[in-house]
Amino acid sequence: MDEAQLTTGFAIGWPWLLALLPLPWLLRHLLPESPARSMQALRVPWYGEMAGDRKAWLRRPLLASVAAVVWILLVAAAIRPQWVGEINDLPVTGRDLLLAVDISGSMDTQDMVLGSRVVNRLVAVKQVAGEFIQRRRGDRVGLILFGSRAYLQTPLTFDTETTATLLGESEIGLAGRETAIGDAIGLAVKRLREDAASDRVLILLTDGANTSGEVQPLQAAEFAAREGLTIYTVGVGADEMMVQDFFGSRVVNPSADLDEDTLQTIAERTGGRYFRARDAEGLADIYQLLDELEPVESDVEAIRPVDELFYWPLGLAYLLALGAGVLILWPNRQSGMAAS
């Protein structure tokens, strides 16, 4: 049934199956009786009652009524009863947005302040990027996690809440302790290559340099540029951090390994931009800016939810048939016990 023609309320998917209702009556009156046999291959407890008189069971009105109701319920399930809901507008866009998040060992560096507490880089990214994902209602959003290798955590989906949840459940080291930036870009190109979206965007966040993987970052950026993939790169990590060692306190640069030149080149070659996030507040500002650079479009698609209801008559038919079987077998069991 065409959903565009449905109205809100009860509907039937396959009404032509109502023609099956008289089938038992037709079979009983049109088909010839089976020939009598001297030996029966199957022993049925109530066979004698049915074989002696073909209409004997009809003299038990309760069983006859149950049989008729069961058949009606089976036909009712077969015609696919449905409940058609109100039309909902789902915002859609021509954009596919992938986030590639570094979960290598260096993301455990505690140089970020979130609220009033010091946290590691991944905790700050989860908080800020998770809010960014949930604001992307209308885009298809996916998530790539990478360390020594890259893997697709969430395929492109309109379910931004689930994508944000899976980002929040990511842990440092699940993909290895090193950083495979090139492999993350290559995986994004592979996933977006066959998509028909007019805008395809990758936001890649890392705190280091490419130290692992089979594909070099700049080579992967060339592939991305040829496929029309725009890459925004984000380098995360503070410039200064106080550490304690054997000689006392000293200030170090925890982002010394961040390869900003490569990240900037990747962005330039693909038509994107490079951003530097030195703290959680700066990271939040970057994602706000990304919202402005890649705004959510306002196109909508009308959908009408349809709930299948066939399992209700089907379940009731099963329970009635089970009760009828007990009703038939119980007298035979009682008589057998009395005879013994």
Image (cartoon, rainbow, N blue to C red):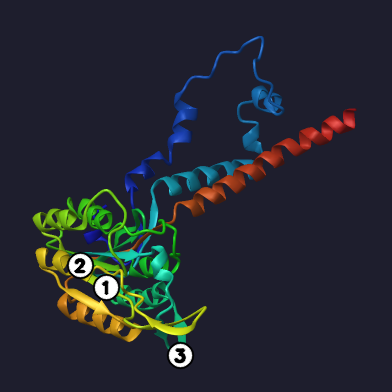
Q: Considering the numbered disc 3 on the image, is that residue within a helix, a strand or a loop?
A: loop
Badge 3 density bin: few <14, some 14–19, many ≥20, Cα 10 Å: few
Q: Amino acid at mark 1?
A: Gly
Whether residue 58 is situated above or below residue 38 in the rendered picture: below
- Closer-to-camera residue (123/265): 265
Please name the amino acid that badge 3 sits on. Answer: Ser
Please identify the quarter of the rendering in which residue 233 is found: bottom left
Q: Which residue is mark 1?
A: 235
Q: Which quarter of the image is occupied by the C terminus?
A: top right
The picture quadrant where one finds residue 46 is top right
Discs 1, 3 touching: Cβ within 8 Å = no
- Looking at the rendered structure, the kind of residue marked 2 is Leu
| Alpha-carbon span between mark 1 and mark 3 | 23 Å
Q: Residue 157 appears at what percent x and percent y?
A: 30, 61
Going from the N terminus, do you reach mark 1 or mark 3 first?
Answer: 3
Viewer-nearest of discs 2 and 3:
2
Marks 2 and 3, how far apart at CA: 30 Å
In this view, the residue in front, 146 or 245, is 245
